[in-house]
């Protein structure tokens, strides 16, 4: 399968929606797992801002790759972000798109942001 590396160094990235388990089958509630590691997959909606344009993208991440507090608006870094084009046919209709996956999503919020009283 084709994988396209995505460069994020010139972009501003923020959490648009906190992590949620990635569901494969909504009827059964089956959760997605990584084919290689067996880890539970999560999705994080990330606001991707670059060159005056903003877009929310959903990024799949294995559970061990989610670190820090990822509340809405938290600035983040995406490690190993790739894009994968996909296509399928369902009920006679072709669908296509691009899915995003990262090795890790890490909070860039300052650790220890609690101020100390003098």
Image (spheres, rainbow, N blue to C red):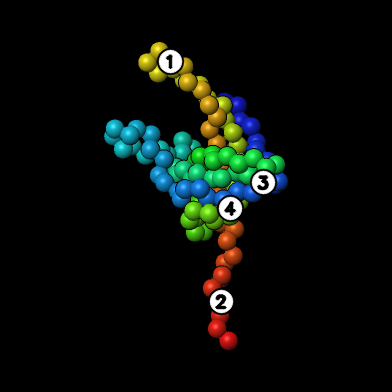
* Mark 1: few/some/many CA within 10 Å (<14, 14-19, 20+): few
**Can residue 33 be seen at all in this image of the molecule?**
yes
Question: What number is the disc on residue 115?
Answer: 2
- Structural distance between the alpha carbons of marks 2 and 3: 29 Å
Q: Quadrant of the N terminus?
A: top right
**In the image, is residue 92 above or below residue 32?**
above
Marks 4 and 3, how far apart at CA: 11 Å
Mark 3 — residue?
Answer: 11
Does residue 8 appear anywhere in the picture? Answer: no
* Residue denoted by label 4: 76
Question: Around disc 4, counting alpha carbons within 10 Å, would you say few (fewer than 14), some (14 to 19), or many (20 or more)?
Answer: many
In the image, residue 11 lies at what x, y percent?
67, 46
Mark 1 secondary-structure assignment: strand
Label 4 to label 1: alpha-carbon separation: 36 Å
Q: Identify the disc placed on residue 93.
A: 1
Residue at 54% over, 73% down: 114
Picture coordinates of residue 7 (x, y %)? 68, 41
Q: Are there few (<14), some (14-19), or many (20+) residues within 10 Å of tag 2?
A: few
For mark 2, give the secondary structure.
Answer: loop
């Amino acid at each position: 399968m084709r994988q396209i590396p995505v460069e994020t160094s010139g972009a501003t990235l923020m959490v648009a929606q906190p992590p949620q388990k990635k569901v494969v089958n909504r009827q059964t509630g089956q959760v997605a797992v990584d084919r290689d590691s067996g880890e539970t997959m999560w999705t994080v909606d990330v606001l991707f801002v670059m060159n005056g344009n903003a877009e929310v993208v959903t990024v799949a991440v294995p559970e061990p790759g989610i670190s820090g507090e990822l509340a809405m608006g938290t600035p983040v870094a995406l490690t190993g972000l790739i894009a994968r084009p996909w296509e399928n046919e369902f009920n006679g209709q072709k669908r296509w798109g691009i899915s995003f996956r990262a090795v890790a999503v890490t909070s860039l919020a300052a650790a220890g942001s609690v101020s100390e009283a003098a």
